[in-house]
Image (spheres, rainbow, N blue to C red):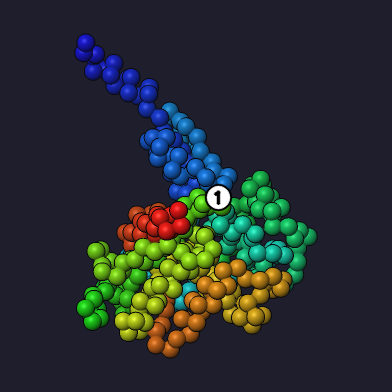
Amino acid sequence: MLLPRYFCWNLQRCTMAFYAVASGRKSGVYGSWAECEEQVKGFKNAKYKKFKTRQEADQFVNGCKSYVPQDVAVPLGKGKAPLASWKNSIKVNESPKYTEEWPEEDHDLAEDDLNAAMNEVEGDPKPSSSSNLADILNRKRKVAASSHMRNKIPRHASQVSEATGLKQVGAFQFEIDAEGYVIVYTDGSCIGNGQAGACAGYGVYFGKNHQLNAAKPVEGRVTNNVGEIQAAIYAIKTALDLGIQKLCINTDSQFLINSITLWVAGWKKRDWKLKNNQPVKNVVDFKELDKLLQDNNITVKWNYVEAHKGIEGNEMADKLARQGSALYKEKHG
């Protein structure tokens, strides 16, 4: 029996559902539970809900965001002039808080939370009334002032590295920016963050179908941050092996950039300790990355790109990183 067209349309409208993920591996609105489940299953403190209309779902996602980016990714020279240096893109805290320890479960924290916690440790030697990181983070989530606090965290403006030419290095061809830096995108991934059997990997992306694109499992601690650091290490080692002298690393990790450009010098002076004398986590990886950055044969420029905004290089690095996580599961499963 054929149903009238208007009846079928109304039936479809009534059964259609929208799954909103405000906090998960990737926030957004999904058309099926399977897609939604992939983003929230095993993700600590995930926030998600089913809605009948797209408008309600969008409102749920946007209403739960504690930080709204002030800058969108734009091609260099198109929306705004490129920054002279990363120092110009860092907002210094006027009255930063202070906590007594590195986050114990850094693989469970969102990028902003981890960046905030470390900035509180390294930003000001004067302790605040609270020294408990859990209390600080809980207070951030419960009070309306949380978004204001996060906006004080040093944040780099998102920029897309615009390729202005090609560079031939041996058998390989690379895209370069206006300053002659070879462009590469790096990313880390951890499936099942904080859970038993978590799998982490990293991705390095030089360009479409490039022979040197890499998807690798992490070595050592199984966290997303380890993947971010090891991806940068891999990219720099690749460049050094080929004799590339200028490399622009595009990453969506504010924490990685701040660690290298703001905090690592102090860690080294204190024998890889924080200001509160606590040990730096992932110290083996940070030491290796720092050693590579001291090599006079290469200059590395750090560029922040916002994740999941349709930036091809970042999306492809993310895809490779997820492949790396899958390889980790195969290797250690």
Q: Residue at x 33, y 19 (%)?
A: 11
Based on the displayed image, in which of its 4 quarters is residue 1 positioned?
top left
User: Residue 102 vs residue 223: left or right?
Assistant: right
Examine the rendering and report whether any part of residue 290 can be seen. Answer: yes
Image coordinates of residue 234 in percent, x first then y, are 40, 72
User: Residue 155 vs residue 279: left or right?
Assistant: left
Q: Which residue is mark 1?
A: 195
Q: Residue at x 36, y 66 (%)?
A: 204
User: Residue 163 vs residue 41: left or right?
Assistant: left
Secondary structure category for the residue under label 1 = loop
Based on the displayed image, in which of its 4 quarters is residue 282 positioned?
bottom right
Q: Is residue 150 above or below residue 206?
A: above
Q: Residue at x 50, y 53 (%)?
A: 198
Q: Residue at x 54, y 63 (%)?
A: 221
Image coordinates of residue 115 in percent, x first then y, are 57, 62
Q: Is residue 40 above or below residue 187?
A: above
Q: Nearer the viewer, residue 130 or 72?
A: 130
Packing grade of label 1 (10 A; few <14, some 14-19, many >=20) is few
Three-letter residue code for mark 1: Gln
